[in-house]
């Protein structure tokens, strides 16, 4: 038994990614507005993580809220097998207009993890139905794709999933393309795609384009992404772009793949799909992946569904979001936020208390420089608590802090974030 300092209630809610023994109380939120969350007492907290990377324009964008209200008055839910509805159709057309041109079909689900599971199943199904024995999935080191059994299998292994290891399937891991070591990544991918070590050729390669999120906010260049795509195409290995975090403007473009002119075979999107208002996800795929399943033989059906597939209210929210993208200057707001982040990061670059100062579009990240691995283990939670005490929601990953706010964040909001970041360093990491 480990020591527990929290007061354990005998019944109640079990929160995600939360160690209740050291975080006995949750902050109750009653309202959200723009870049802020508000407690019932009126305390306003800056949402520096866009509520787990989902909120793009800001909380409660009026157009999205209106669409949700209108749709709730018309149709709340309908089975999506054998039935369809206008918001799902309107959204699919919008997605196919916005996504890379290689993609022709939209399959709905309800979270980033399920979008990835669907992509993996489509990839395996494609090869099986084409009579090829290609079952292996290639992944990028430090990747994160979700917390279901399949998505954990294609993600980095570690403390987060070691208890479930017996259930995880084997994958081929390609080293992360750190700056200066890109050639090693590309060579490893080339060798794995060609199955140079013998055995079957892989079925697919799944990758977070340009920015690895939960793996530590690690960024790599568009040229490497383009090269990885080229290698997969040359060996007919399906290229799955997991744009769950990077989509909807986060990296400065609608989808991160655009920076590299990459047209994936499958693309997963969720989070910002509804502007961060409702749970919804989509897996987009190339026509030949659909075609492999298209048959009068029912055994070739794509056997995947969940009860709330294409929930009409969520689809209406996402369709309104797509209209916002089409009609409002969202990319200009994204560029303005990226520039504001860049200015403030520049001040950290010359400050010896920080290192690995980096940015990918609107996402800023840096590490507190520290030699003391002893307190590193508890640094994340202590920094988290310190930022909370200053009314900032930031969730450090160890000594890495990232700032990923909604696009309506102002210069004053960011000044407060970076002043507080420096204040923590001034107090001293040991004394937080
Ligand atoms: N893929 C990526 C790249 C992600 O960042 C996440 C979530 N952080 C997921 C998949 C899983 O999404 P969800 O939490 O909605 O299941």
Image (cartoon, grey):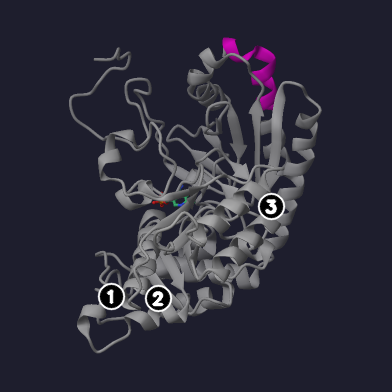
User: Distance between the Cα atoms at labels 1 and 3?
Assistant: 39 Å
Q: CA distance from mark 2 to mark 3?
A: 34 Å
Residue occupying the point 46% across, 71% down: 284
| Residue on which the image places disc 2 | 88
Mark 2 and mark 3 lie on one chain; the one further toward the N terminus is 2
Crowdedness near tag 3: few (<14), some (14–19) or many (≥20) residues, C-alpha within 10 Å: some
Tag 2, which secondary structure? Answer: helix
In the image, taking residue 411 as reference, residue 245 lies left or right, namely left
Q: Are marks 2 and 3 in contact (CB under 8 Å)?
A: no
Q: Residue at x 28, y 75 (%)?
A: 80
First to last magenta residue range:
419-431
Q: Which mark is nearer the camera, 2 or 3?
A: 3
Q: Which of the two discs, 1 and 3, labels the residue nearer the N terminus?
A: 1
Residue 80: image tag: 1
Q: Is residue 215 above or below residue 151?
A: above
Query: Which residue is painted at 68% across and 62% down in the image?
Result: 259
**Residue 97 in view here:** yes
Q: Are marks 2 and 1 in contact (CB under 8 Å)?
A: yes
Q: Is residue 234 above or below residue 363?
A: below
User: Residue 221: which disc?
Assistant: 3
């Amino acid at each position: 038994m480990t020591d527990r300092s929290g007061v354990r209630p005998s019944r109640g809610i079990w929160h995600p990614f939360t160690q209740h023994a050291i975080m006995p109380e949750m902050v109750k939120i009653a309202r959200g507005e723009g870049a802020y969350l508000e407690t019932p007492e009126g305390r306003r907290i800056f949402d520096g993580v866009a509520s787990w990377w989902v909120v793009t324009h800001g909380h409660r964008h009026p157009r999205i809220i209106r669409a949700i209200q209108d749709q709730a008055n018309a149709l709340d839910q309908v089975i999506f097998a054998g039935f369809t509805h206008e918001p799902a159709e309107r959204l699919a057309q919008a997605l196919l207009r916005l996504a890379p041109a290689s993609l022709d079909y939209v399959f709905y689900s309800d979270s980033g993890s399920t979008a990835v599971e669907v992509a993996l199943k489509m990839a395996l199904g494609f090869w099986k139905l084409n009579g090829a024995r290609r079952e292996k999935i290639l992944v990028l080191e430090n990747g994160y794709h979700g917390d279901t059994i399949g998505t954990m299998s294609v993600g980095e292994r570690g403390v987060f999933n070691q208890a479930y290891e017996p259930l995880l399937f084997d994958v081929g891991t390609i080293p992360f393309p750190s700056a200066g070591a890109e050639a090693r990544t590309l060579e490893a991918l080339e060798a794995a795609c060609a199955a140079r070590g013998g055995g079957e050729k892989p079925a697919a390669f799944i990758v977070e384009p340009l920015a690895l999120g939960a793996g530590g906010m690690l960024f790599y260049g568009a040229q490497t992404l383009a090269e990885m795509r080229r290698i997969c195409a040359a060996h007919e290995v399906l290229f799955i772009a997991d744009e769950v975090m990077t989509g909807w403007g986060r990296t400065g473009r609608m989808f991160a793949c655009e920076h590299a002119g990459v047209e994936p075979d499958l693309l997963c999107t969720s989070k910002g799909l509804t502007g961060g208002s409702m749970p919804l996800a989509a897996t987009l795929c190339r026509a030949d992946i659909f075609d492999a399943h298209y048959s009068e033989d029912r055994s070739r059906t794509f056997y995947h569904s969940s009860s709330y597939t294409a929930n009409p209210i969520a689809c209406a929210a996402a369709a309104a979001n797509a209209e916002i993208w089409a009609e409002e200057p969202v990319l200009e707001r994204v560029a303005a936020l990226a520039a504001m982040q860049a200015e403030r990061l520049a001040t950290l670059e010359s400050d010896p208390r920080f290192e690995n100062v980096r940015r990918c579009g609107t996402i800023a990240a840096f590490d507190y420089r520290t030699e003391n691995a002893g307190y590193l283990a508890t640094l994340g939670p202590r920094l988290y608590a310190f930022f909370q005490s200053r009314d900032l929601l930031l969730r450090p990953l160890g000594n890495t802090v990232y700032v990923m706010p909604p696009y309506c964040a102002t210069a004053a909001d960011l000044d407060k974030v970076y002043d507080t970041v420096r204040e923590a360093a001034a107090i001293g990491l040991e004394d937080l």
